[in-house]
């Protein structure tokens, strides 16, 4: 029995060493994933914002370009783009989303960097005229309110609100509006679609989270045994696996180039108009 106990001890020690190595691999793998997620630079956000701006998607353009600006400050100017490029593109969606004061502040920042910026000069004049006209209209409305109401509390509250807005403008503390266009039905459908993409619909319990894992998989295949595939189980039911670094970027571009000509926007029935219309959420095979 003594020999058996010694052998079991050796096997147990070997098993623990292998498990420790496996855990180290998993830890390195998780660190790699985290580094890739946080590696998105200001330039990446800028490119996405520009793409949204090109399609007149001002809602996403404003968010991504603002994120690019924030990350630029964190990256100590190591990004491929300059601050003035981001600001110049951020002005338009900011204005389109009815944030004139904030757009003016962005233009003034551009001029502080480049006083000779022609487009910024024109925008500054235009935005200031809009703000002045709106201020005059507000003052005229206040005069009408003074003449047509005896409710002094209401007038006092109105003046107080105007004062707060004025101070906020001077301090450049703008609450940027970014209303998403579309009907309630469209917005609800879009929100559900995006939540699924982000897996926000799957609020897993700790028990279910414990079944998720990351590992290197090779299935004893001679071609990949020296370079196993990075496998991540992201959902247990239905089982969804994510394989990292399987296809190179160049191969991905080739596949996309071959596939795109055969794809089109999916057609769905509009519940409101009972007509068939293309949707921006899905694609289908071109017939």
Image (cartoon, helix red, strand yellow):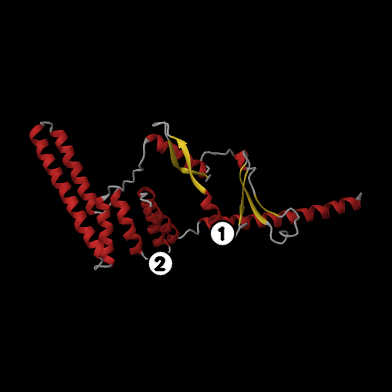
Pointer 2: residues within 10 angstroms few (<14), some, or many (20+)? few
Q: Where residue 211 sits: x, y (%)?
A: 65, 42
Residue drawn 27% across and 47% down? 98
Seen from this angle, which residue lies furthest left? 147
SS assignment at label 2? loop
Q: Nearer the viewer, residue 9 or 283?
A: 283
Q: Name the side, left or right, on which 52 lies relative to 163.
A: right
In-image side of 155 versus 221 (left or right): left
Image mark count: 2
Q: Secondary structure at mark 1?
A: helix
Picture coordinates of residue 67, whole percent (x, y) = 40, 55
Instruction: In this rendered view, identify the residue nearer to me: 52 or 170.
Output: 52
Q: Earlier in the sequence, mark 2 or mark 1?
A: 2
Q: Tell me: residue 156, above or below residue 87.
A: above
The residue carrying pointer 1 sits among few (fewer than 14), some (14 to 19) or many (20 or more) residues within 10 Å by Cα, namely few
Residue 107 position, x and y percent, is 26, 59
Judging by the rendered image, the residue that carries numbered circle 1 is: 254
Q: Which mark is residue 77?
A: 2
Identify the residue shown where x is 31% and y is 60%.
88
């Amino acid at each position: 029995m003594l020999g058996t106990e010694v052998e079991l001890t050796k096997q147990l020690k070997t098993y623990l060493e292998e498990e420790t190595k496996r855990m180290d691999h998993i830890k390195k793998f998780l660190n790699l994933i985290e580094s890739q997620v946080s590696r998105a630079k200001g330039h990446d956000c800028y490119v996405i914002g520009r793409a949204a701006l090109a399609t007149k998607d001002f809602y996403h353009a404003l968010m991504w370009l603002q994120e690019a600006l924030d990350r630029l400050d964190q990256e100590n100017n190591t990004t491929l783009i300059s601050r003035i490029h981001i600001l110049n593109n951020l002005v338009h969606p900011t204005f389109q989303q009815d944030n004139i004061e904030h757009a003016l502040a962005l233009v003034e920042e551009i001029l502080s960097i480049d006083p000779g910026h022609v487009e910024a000069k024109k925008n500054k004049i235009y935005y200031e005229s809009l703000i002045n006209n709106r201020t005059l209209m507000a003052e005229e409305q206040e005069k009408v309110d003074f003449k047509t109401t005896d409710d002094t509390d209401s007038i006092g509250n109105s003046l107080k609100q105007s004062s707060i807005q004025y101070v906020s403008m001077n301090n450049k503390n703008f609450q940027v509006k970014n209303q998403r266009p579309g009907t309630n039905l469209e917005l609800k459908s879009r929100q559900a679609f995006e939540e699924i993409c982000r897996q926000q619909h799957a609020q897993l319990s700790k028990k279910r989270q414990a079944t998720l894992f990351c590992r290197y998989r090779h299935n004893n295949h001679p071609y990949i045994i020296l370079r196993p595939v990075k496998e991540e189980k992201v959902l247990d039911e239905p089982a969804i696996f994510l394989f990292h670094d399987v296809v190179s970027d160049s191969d991905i571009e080739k596949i996309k180039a071959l596939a795109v000509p055969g794809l089109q926007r999916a057609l769905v029935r509009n519940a409101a108009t009972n007509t068939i219309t293309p949707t921006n959420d899905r694609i289908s095979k071109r017939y």
